[in-house]
Image (cartoon, coloured by chain):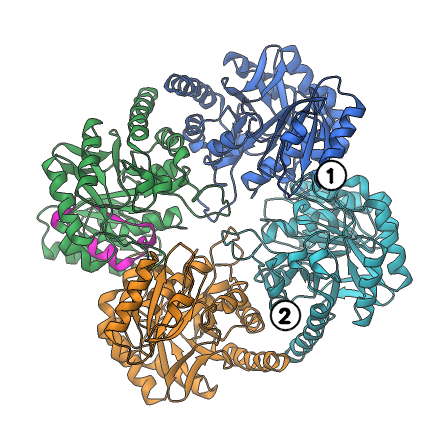
Chain colours: A cyan, B orange, C green, D blue
Amino acid sequence: MIIQLKEGVTEQEKAAIISKLKSAKYKATEVKTQCCNYLIGIGKSEFDIRTVGHMPGIKDLHRVSDDFKLVSRKWKVNPSVVDLGDGLQIKQGNFAIMAGPCSIEDETQIQKTIDHLKANDIRIMRGGVFKPRSSPYSFRGLGIDGLKLFYRMCRENGIKIITEVMQVSQIAPMLDYVDIFQVGARNTQNFNLLDELGKVDKPVMIKRGISGTIDELLYSAEYVFSGGNEKLILCERGIRTYETASRNTLDLNAVPILKDKTHLPVIVDPSHGIGIREYIEPMALAAVMAGADGIIYETHEKPEEAASDGAQTLNFAESERLVKKLRAAYALREQLG
Amino acid sequence: MIIQLKEGVTEQEKAAIISKLKSAKYKATEVKTQCCNYLIGIGKSEFDIRTVGHMPGIKDLHRVSDDFKLVSRKWKVNPSVVDLGDGLQIKQGNFAIMAGPCSIEDETQIQKTIDHLKANDIRIMRGGVFKPRSSPYSFRGLGIDGLKLFYRMCRENGIKIITEVMQVSQIAPMLDYVDIFQVGARNTQNFNLLDELGKVDKPVMIKRGISGTIDELLYSAEYVFSGGNEKLILCERGIRTYETASRNTLDLNAVPILKDKTHLPVIVDPSHGIGIREYIEPMALAAVMAGADGIIYETHEKPEEAASDGAQTLNFAESERLVKKLRAAYALREQLG
Amino acid sequence: MIIQLKEGVTEQEKAAIISKLKSAKYKATEVKTQCCNYLIGIGKSEFDIRTVGHMPGIKDLHRVSDDFKLVSRKWKVNPSVVDLGDGLQIKQGNFAIMAGPCSIEDETQIQKTIDHLKANDIRIMRGGVFKPRSSPYSFRGLGIDGLKLFYRMCRENGIKIITEVMQVSQIAPMLDYVDIFQVGARNTQNFNLLDELGKVDKPVMIKRGISGTIDELLYSAEYVFSGGNEKLILCERGIRTYETASRNTLDLNAVPILKDKTHLPVIVDPSHGIGIREYIEPMALAAVMAGADGIIYETHEKPEEAASDGAQTLNFAESERLVKKLRAAYALREQLG
Amino acid sequence: MIIQLKEGVTEQEKAAIISKLKSAKYKATEVKTQCCNYLIGIGKSEFDIRTVGHMPGIKDLHRVSDDFKLVSRKWKVNPSVVDLGDGLQIKQGNFAIMAGPCSIEDETQIQKTIDHLKANDIRIMRGGVFKPRSSPYSFRGLGIDGLKLFYRMCRENGIKIITEVMQVSQIAPMLDYVDIFQVGARNTQNFNLLDELGKVDKPVMIKRGISGTIDELLYSAEYVFSGGNEKLILCERGIRTYETASRNTLDLNAVPILKDKTHLPVIVDPSHGIGIREYIEPMALAAVMAGADGIIYETHEKPEEAASDGAQTLNFAESERLVKKLRAAYALREQLG
């Protein structure tokens, strides 16, 4: 059960509600986010919510049968809006496009990418400075200095940035140089990281785990939300299956299912999803029709020379063509209703 | 290597080519289909195809590095056309729509479905009369008499039918009452069935196995083609993964990959693919943008009363809405190029 | 619900029971096997079995909550015994060893294998004459003539044979030359084949499907049993997962689970299961401790020259060592209880 | 390539070797562990190792074709020994048994478990104080105070402890109260955590990822080893597959494969592996025969009252029976050779 408390609720009122819940063997967890104050009640017995509903301090009360609560659409029917400032919002009813290289390499690369994005009216740039790599001997990214350069250049050009955070100790130094924190597929169940991102007042995009279920993704989002951060975005990026013809199996089924289960916006990453350059475009377009609220993909001036992920990275000409088609597909989707 | 023989090639010419292949330790398999006569040469050593290319009786010769040969696009770049007669073709550049109930139930059900199809300009009806069921105690379909009724009624209304064949002994009795034989996901590697369907002059649609790889689907098609039947259609229908939020995981990645690997048309079955009624529409639309040459889905006047698969079956209103959107999406895809 | 009928039950008695079931909206399916006569009652409502239990003609009656019935251990607690004649039985409390080549090649190969088996007191030889192959251009086995030779030579040496049947039309010609019919992993859900094997009075070993669930394997066994054939053996042979370090993932978890769910004997095939020669032995020994009732594996005088599956085939020295260890492990398991 | 440097190698000698590697376009990474000093050379070109082998400062040099290097058995053929002190070693040739509850709950529980372990001559106790949980509302463990209590009580009784570390910031406070750090399945690719554990002089056991490949597990171990910590143990704990009859699919195939690929000891966790209490014993015994160097399992005085994981936890009577059988099975394995 989710109890949304009134603004200005007193400690006494809160205590009374918690005590009422306890008497019904419900455990109450208090959640304070950027905008609201909630009590999450969890218990097994039947419970007549009317016995609580009238208590002072309560603005709203919902029974939520899902095991995840605050991210469930059973509670919040209206889609969430994640505001990036400067008139930029990630939400249902917009179509967000995020593009950029796998890894940030140097000033020239950043500038060329920014130019490409601006020419195509793309307002969010992706790019990794901390890179999770299977092998310890691979390139692990430019680190915090690279991030500062990346951020400064984007800022000067009116571009927002999304970049991966890999561990708790990176959050504080990154905080001022990030518009969206990305939690990568290997960290979807890094619960300490999620806990800490719950304390931050910056949007967080959580990628589905490498073999994560849809419900596990929602639970991970619940960690951040119940930690205090409502600014959440989910991302489908392909799952691991027996099929070897593609790098991963982009699971577009997750899109309508997530849109049904949660009020959070859902982004699709076709680059990691299928992992083969020639097939990014059809999968990205398919994602639009499946109901995605946006796309994140990899692009680089010269994919064959990229520091990482070249085999799934579009060059700028391909990227430009994709963006045009994405917008046309999205326009059609909106029109069809 | 695929050697396409000239019309009127003599036995002597053929023998000479085969002998030449043998001398290079290549095994030659002769294939006669409805339209052509081929020699498939398989061997491991390097082979200078120019030493054979000039021999009399040869129309064309291609090296094919894939392990499947006749279904490979490395040999035949132009997409195949499967002609159903009466101006109806399944091919790239068309968009085939096949709809109907999971199981054929009775005359009323058939008539109502036909009326629905005609009202929406759908020219191919699906419907099972032999049903593969996990449990021996479940409804197994109306059998051959049901098929005759189904076929007669469709014929009178200018509708083509596609229906599943489960075993070799059903082929002969079904032959005159079927427009497209469907090989179901449990029979994708029923090689005897594929062998026999190779001898038939009727289109065959092969569904991907329940956990079949893309390459295995192509090998299964190679069985039918090398058995003599070029009239082949492939169908993606969802694979088995760890995810339980959907019945199967519709693998749309298979669409651009198959379109790249083979010249055969590719159909998508979103009904079995995701297996949940509310999500059929977005997945079907996504399939269009992924590059599918058509869609097959389940519809029934009253899904909740259907003899099987009700939970993934659209009612006629949903079906009508879907068809309109499919055509709009396909029109956009063609326009975007 | 399973109703075992008395020997000599009259048609009238049976009709009365069926009518009673119908009045409770239970569908009754009559099953006659080699030894018994059953009525399987399937329905959704609650049903007081005491209202039927006293009726004449009933020997025994069990409620079975599983969806599979006759193969469930909820009905038949005592393990089944599959008798091969000549004092040879496959059952819990024995440990069956079946060995031989993937494919039967020629007389010399058969004789050498027989000599090896006899020297190691192995009484069942495996060997395929009909081979399911992914590619139509691969070797497909010696066929029925090979089977006759194989059977005659084994018979003369007191060896029983197990070999794969791929389609319905092969059953009749194979019948007199087979001791155990094997249903391969690609045919686990070939329901027509299972139906027909239900009518045969020969043991049938069903392999788990390539990505078949444990329950699907039990359903497939239910097909054969309810078709009339109780002489059933199950076989775990590896499933398809994302892991590529082994050919398949031998799922030994299936052994204790199957032993718990069904009264049928459970055999393990480590050769296909892990698919790499060096690892067959540890997996076979592990299978013993997991509770398997026997092992089937591939052996060949010269694996590197075998017509198929050489990479997962033991040579005779390895086979001899394995058999000794298997027996020691089994002795320990029996002793530990 | 792995170059083991001599004790007392000079900076000058090292520089000369690195420069030689660079001239062949090999990147050199220096690794200092508790016992040795290595240079790892990574490059793509062919390289004649004799041109380096004679250089001063080099003790030993091996070409390693695997992508992981220091954990590969291609370099170090002899199995590694992880010494826990007090005569306790985890290694091939011993058989380690680690048992205890999922979560540490209180003093009584710890004491009862210790008594049980001592009565059965088990010298390593497992028990979580930091618990990764899918839902943020579940019990997350007693934390560092619980650990101190746990460690003190074990120490007084001559028991070593293994417990999970979830994040970098926990390492320092845990360091003095842990005998083996466990990296859980959700953190197998938490590379920052692995990096930091590389700097610690305590044994680390890494569990295979929830859907991790065998190679990924080895790469993760390479992180810790190349970070400076050779005291490594690997753990198979079940993978995610489509099968729902077991919680996970314990992949015993991984045992012989890992034993072949790496010199590190391999432990099996049947509790998480199959996840169903009744089947823990057969899977644990199977793991012995598959070649495991030890077993870790969950036991609790009253599993039904355990704070977590009760459904896969043995009671003490079951645990006692298991340990006896494990030792008998291991004795047989050693005897069979």
Measuring from the top left, give residue C135's x and y in whole percent: 36, 58
Residue at position x 46%, y 64% in the image: B237
Q: Nearer the viewer, residue B329 or A265?
A: B329
Chain letter of the residue carrying label 1? D
Q: Quick check: is D201 in the magenta stretch?
A: no
Give the side of residue C131 with respect to residue D222, left or right.
left
Question: Mark 1: few, some, or many residues within 10 Å (few <14, many ≥20)?
Answer: few
Q: Which residue is mark 1?
A: D23
Q: Which residue is mark 2?
A: A285
Tag 1: amino acid? Ser
Q: Does residue B130 show up?
A: no
Q: Is residue A73 above or below residue C160?
A: below
Q: Closer to the camera: disc 2 or disc 1?
A: 1
Question: Mark 2: few, some, or many residues within 10 Å (few <14, many ≥20)?
Answer: many
Magenta residue span: C176-200
Separation of residues labelled 2 and 1 (CA atoms): 47 Å
Tag 2: amino acid? Leu
